[in-house]
Amino acid sequence: MFNINWDNIIEKDVNDKNKELAKKAIQGIKHKKETSEIGFMNVNEGIINTERLISTSKWIQDNADDFVVLGIGGSSLGGKTIVTALNNKFNKKGIRVHFIDNVDPDYFTDLLNSIDLKRTVFNVISKSGSTAETMAQFLVVYRLLFEKLGKKEAVSRIILTTDPKKGALRPLENSMGFKTLDVPQNIGGRFCALTDVGLLPAAVAGIDVKSLLKGAGEMANRSLTDDLVKNQMLEYSIVKYIHALKGYDISVLMPYSTKLFDFSLWYVQLWAESLGKQGKGQTPIPATGATDQHSQVQLFMEGPKDKLITFIGIKEHSNVVNIPDFETPIEAFSYLSGHTMKELLDAEMNSTQKALYENKVPSVKIELPKLDAYNLGALMMFFELATATTGEFMGINAFDQPGVELGKKYTYQMMGRKGY
Amino acid sequence: MFNINWDNIIEKDVNDKNKELAKKAIQGIKHKKETSEIGFMNVNEGIINTERLISTSKWIQDNADDFVVLGIGGSSLGGKTIVTALNNKFNKKGIRVHFIDNVDPDYFTDLLNSIDLKRTVFNVISKSGSTAETMAQFLVVYRLLFEKLGKKEAVSRIILTTDPKKGALRPLENSMGFKTLDVPQNIGGRFCALTDVGLLPAAVAGIDVKSLLKGAGEMANRSLTDDLVKNQMLEYSIVKYIHALKGYDISVLMPYSTKLFDFSLWYVQLWAESLGKQGKGQTPIPATGATDQHSQVQLFMEGPKDKLITFIGIKEHSNVVNIPDFETPIEAFSYLSGHTMKELLDAEMNSTQKALYENKVPSVKIELPKLDAYNLGALMMFFELATATTGEFMGINAFDQPGVELGKKYTYQMMGRKGY
């Protein structure tokens, strides 16, 4: 499990009032767990049918060269995050896993033109079965498969991941024979990465889903104590909260890992949609180190002092890349020779953090032992829990999204849905 | 060329003082153009050797299955933006173009493990020839090619794009025989998308670079008048400026196009690194419609009232995707049938903009006629110019990046560079 380095935060003192708040926050989310109001903390407690997931993924691997997830928001970001983090995106062998999270007609057509329908399996993911973008994709793909391969093949090549009981998709299991998987009733879109939603794409990509769940479960267990000293998740949450109160209300996530870029986007959804309410919210910003040192760091350094940055460093990489000498020594870069890429990456991270702190920009650093399924599961659970406790601090319900309803209503009107 | 819809902004009145500021801003950037202090406005005026670019790209297409850009920040984002916007990323035929913009040892190894060095060409892009990350990549790749294919092949398979006269890479053209391309002396990293830096990857990917330049050139021409009524770029810049003064100082870019996601990241660099100085800066945020309606829109709608959103809509797509009926009508989504995906996408955009405005969140909408090379060139020039004029409004030099020097110094120290 990982350590957090607090050396570079600005507001170091958690006062008694906030300690009391922290205790209440933990009590709040524990209560939600115990009453089964909220289920994401329980993903390693037998609620996920991993055997079914694994056998489904084996069938897909045997029957497809392309696996296409049709879903948007929480139905896409979690799986995408896991697959990007743990897979080799350049690999030309093995099954290709795609996430089509929009209704961009050109992007969608590009995909359809590139796949062999006879060797493709689609996974339609929508808890309610009424997500407009996903349902539009479903209608197009079903018709296409139907016309090219017939009804039986069309039904067999689409897996529906949806609410176990409710919603518009669930009845199609019995009426038409679609294979189905579950979005647990008490786990909402942005918290369902570690359910069938994100775990099926992960399993199809060959990732160890049991280790993902194990890491998540251990993080959940160790994070439900109200002892601030032992609970890094709670400390992280309260540090962000007290910085936000002092005006550092933009919350940057900057992993030093290209493979964690989608993780940043997943975090953005989690933080923005859970906590952006009642005129409040810490605006999240995705970044990647070292890349963004050449993009956003100028602003972080010299722009408004409204940002708290969370770095994520990886202690041990899977590969060592040695930087060799050049033919003739060239002053501008020969100092790099003899080092490894990782040493350079770490030096960049530590330098940036140090320079920011000297410029009064606070940051926190999470030190991940390794980027593997176990630690990624733990990291995802860490941020899900931190979102929930931060909601408690702010007096906000982290589990709804009332602000998107008006836009949906107008969309239904414009598209001619009855009753709108 | 495109239209801008201003119906949903909040601050509608540009006062005389700001009109005067706008005039001065245009005079300022025209002066920089006329004195050749800044060159990005001139890319369509014969300064780019397009014949050399095209012949180089043909040689690459004939001699490679993979083309790998080694560069970071402005040396990567521009080319990546163009290729993502105009190419089919799912296409399995033709040359693959990769942008390796980091020193993540695992990501880098993933790439190296997937390519055939005998059928790969690398493009090392660094104006100064001293960018640590890029030089580390260069050293690794040169040694690898040298060991596998010998010196002659190693030299022939690496193209250096760098300053025409200065820097650490330029001398290698004569001393070792590397092919070289130019980053014009008066065009800095984040403004060089439409030079050899971004145009070579574009040409390799089969994109019409002359149309990119033509669109950019026409946008530059029409944007250098100080008549606010005729100059949409200037109006856009001043609208953002006066909103920022009123507290809307987070600047979201939200194209309704998956293919423009990298464009959002390119914009983030441009805006953040150019304008984040002296304690000022409009913090840029990347978003994608409709996808981010299921992620960030909740925050935009109900979070702090500090955001101005720029939508980009595409009027005409290359593909029409009809949404068909399902077997049996299902109330939750049968209203979609008979529409096209584009109608849904447009309805989502218009609904979101309307709902935001009713909630007092201002937005601007850019209506792009088509996502093609000509219009993308125009769009990129539009944002480059708007960055420059906004710098003038704010009294900030948009063309330097002093805030990243301290971090660089610490990195050199940690890596043992002499003199640091």
Image (tube, coloured by chain):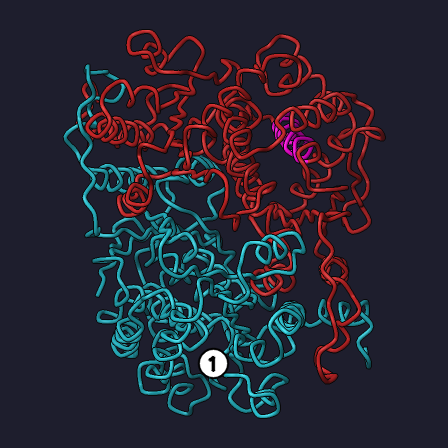
Chain colours: A red, B cyan
Residue located 39% across and 22% down the image: A159
Q: Which residue is disc 1 drawn over?
A: B187
Residue B109 drawn at (x, y percent): 63, 55
Q: Is residue B404 visible to the viewer in this orientation of the structure?
A: no
Provide the residue span drawn in magenta: A376-393
**Relative height, residue B401 to residue A262 (above, below):** below
**Horizontal side, residue A369 vs residue B323: left or right:** right
Residue at 39% across / 76% down in the picture?
A: B59
Side (left or right) of B3 relative to A341: left
Can you see residue B293?
yes
- Which residue is painted at 36% across and 37% down in the image? B359
* Image side of residue B401 versus residue B292, left or right: right
Tell me the quarter of the image containing the N terminus of chain A.
top right
Residue A276: x, y in percent? 51, 35
Query: Was residue A384 drawn as part of the magenta stretch in this picture?
Result: yes
- Depth check: B242 or A262 in front? A262
Up/down of B347 relative to B205, above or below: above
Quadrant including the C terminus of chain A:
top left
| Depth order, front residue of B14/A29 | A29
- Chain letter of disc 1? B
Up/down of A253 relative to B219, above or below: above
Whether residue A216 is in magenta: the answer is no
Q: Quadrant of residue B194?
A: bottom left
* Residue B417 image position (x, y, % from top left): 79, 76
Residue B33 in the image: above or below residue B233:
below
Q: Secondary structure at mark 1?
A: loop
Residue closest to the eye, A89 or B318: A89
Q: Quadrant of residue A345?
A: bottom right
Crowd tier of the residue under label 1, counting other residues whose Cα lies within 10 Å: few below 14, some 14–19, many 20 or above: many
